[in-house]
Structure formats: structure tokens, C-alpha cells
Amino acid sequence: MTQSQKILEVLRRGSILTAPVARSQYGIQNLRARICELRDEGVAIQSVPYVRKNGTEGVKYVLGR
């Protein structure tokens, strides 16, 4: 299973995906690049900004409707 397929499977389950989770749980180092590839294939993925516990900003990815 490719990284893009893993991401799509996670998002289809209704989960939210962040870069740290993608790295630690799925071994995906460059989540943003895989998200771009999926979007290029026509998958509707939304980027949701958020603030991490340490105060830095991040992005959560969810499957669009």
C-alpha cells in the first residue's frame, strides 16, 4: 500500500491527520506532498489550521464533503 493510499484510508475513516501523527504512526515523512498528490487526483481534502499545545501553528487534514 502506498503512502497516499494509507492517507486516503485514514481520512475515509473520518480521522483527522497531522504531520506528527503521519510520521509517528504511518512512517510518512512528507505529508504535505502526499496531500498535494491526492488533491491533483481530484480528492477533496481540506486543510484546517490549528495551534499546537506548544503554541506553534500546524495544519490538520480532513476529507472534504
Image: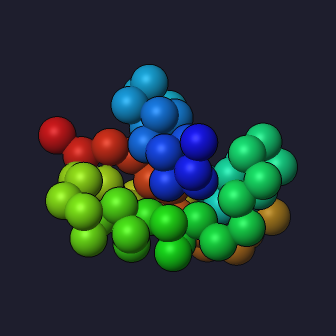
Side of 1 relative to 35 (left or right)? right
From the viewer's perspective, is residue 36 above or below residue 15? below
Task: For the N terminus, give its image quadrant.
Answer: top right
Quadrant location of the C terminus in the rendered image: top left
Q: Position of residue 61 (x, y in %)?
A: 45, 53
Q: Nearer the viewer, residue 7 or 48?
A: 7
Q: Tell which of 39 and 52 is nearer to you.
A: 39
Q: Position of residue 51 (x, y in %)?
A: 61, 62
Residue beneath the point at 64% across and 72% down: 30
Which residue is located at x 73 percent, y 45 percent?
A: 26
- Relative to residue 65, is residue 58 depicted above or below? below
Measured as percent of width and height from the top left, residue 56 is found at: 70, 73
Residue at position x 43%, y 42% in the image = 8
Residue 22 or 49: which is nearer the viewer? 22
Count the marks: 0
Q: Please name the residue shown 24% across and 53% down the image.
A: 43
Q: Can you name the residue that lies furthest to the front here?
A: 1
49 on left or right of 63? right
Query: How far across and down, in percent of the image, does residue 38 sit?
Result: 35, 61
Is residue 51 in view from this perspective? no
Above/below status of 33 relative to 61: below
Residue 60 seen in render: yes
